[in-house]
Amino acid sequence: MIMNNQTVFSKFLLLGLPIPSEHQHLFYTLFLAMYLTTIMGNLIIIILIYLDSHLHTPMYLFLSNLSFSDLCFSSVTMPKLLHTMQSKDISISYASCLTQMYFLMVFGDMESFLLVVMAYDRYVAICFPLHYTSIMSPKLCVCLVLLSWMITMLYSMLHTLLLARLTFCEDNVIPHFFCDISVLLKLACSDIYINELMIYILGGLVIVIPFLLIVVSYVQIVFSILMISPTRVIHKIFSTCGSHLSVVSLFYGTIIGLYLCPSANNSTVKKIAMAMMYTVVTPMLNPFIYSLRNRDMKNALIRVLCKKKISL
Ligand SMILES: *[C@@H]1O[C@H](CO)[C@@H](O)[C@H](O)[C@H]1NC(C)=O
């Protein structure tokens, strides 16, 4: 073993997607379209909620935050992927790689925290409808959002700093389309015990606890509806929490598929497909899930458009 910790690579090679070169153009167009849809969909939601005062309720302010982090989340990976596919330049500097990893964690975990905050909001709305406005005060909402941002930033910073102290030796090829922490750890040639320990402990806290909190609030919601109208449980849940439940299933479904399916960890292609799912597909679908069946959003769109016409 050569112990040379001066061998510092200034670059990584991002192999990108395993797509045959004759299909590159097709996939490039597809990803570009998906990325633009993500940007448009989420921007429309943010602007609509900002412009329409009827939507200045905790639920929609949280949704606007979710859209913002979806937008940023896919902007961390997609432009680089599209650029790589176009220019065939697969290198990425060490600093960009760590930066990408940091922001990916920030926005990914933010989504998980926002889903908890939104679940709590639904829980209060259903279980304490009369006290809703006094419990979900603007002050509490801002605190919840700020707290979520602070936790995710600290958490991501910790992982990034822990990774920055590692040395990387011979192998600088990343068989993925973004700098994923698990892939980077595989390339490191120093001891990664602490990094892995932190991933298990803190990763558990950031993913498992939010998931449990969401489950607990839904259990409470189901019980409280059962007390009032046992026959209409399903209908009531879907009318008030349908969108939130769909987003939660999509988000945690992918994570569970990725980490709990043993076969998914073995094959690179499967891993990339799953990563595609949570970095590209989920952020693209969230705005549609929230706006399609939602009368408030449709009315807001009509109001905003009509106002524009009158003012013109
Ligand atoms: C996020 O939520 C907070 C608290 O409800 C709100 O004040 C803020 O405007 C939201 N931010 C965005 C970008 O939607």
Image (spheres, grey):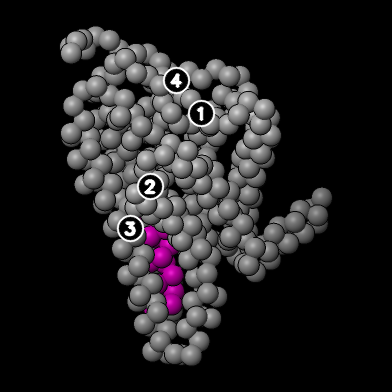
* Residue type beneath disc 3: Pro
Q: Nearer the viewer, mark 4 or mark 3?
A: 4
The segment highlighted magenta reads 113-127
Gap in angstroms between the C-alphas marked 3 and 1: 31 Å
Q: How far apart are the alpha carbons under marks 4 and 2? A: 26 Å
Label 3 Cα neighbours within 10 Å, binned few <14 / some 14-19 / many ≥20: many
Dot 4, how many residues are within 10 Å of its Cα: few (below 14), some (14-19), or many (20+)?
many
**Between 21 and 163, the one nearer to me in the picture:** 21
Closer to the camera, 114 or 226? Answer: 226
User: Disc 2 marks which residue?
Assistant: 263
* Horizontal relation, residue 132 to residue 6: left or right: right
**Label placed on residue 210:** 3
Q: Kindly state the secondary structure of the residue where label 3 is placed.
A: helix
Single out the mark in the foreground, 4 or 2: 2
Residue hosting label 1: 16
* Closest to the observer, 29 or 220: 29
Residue at the spot 64% in from the left edge and 63% down from the top edge: 292
| Distance Cα–Cα, label 1 vs label 4 | 9 Å
- Element class at badge 2: helix
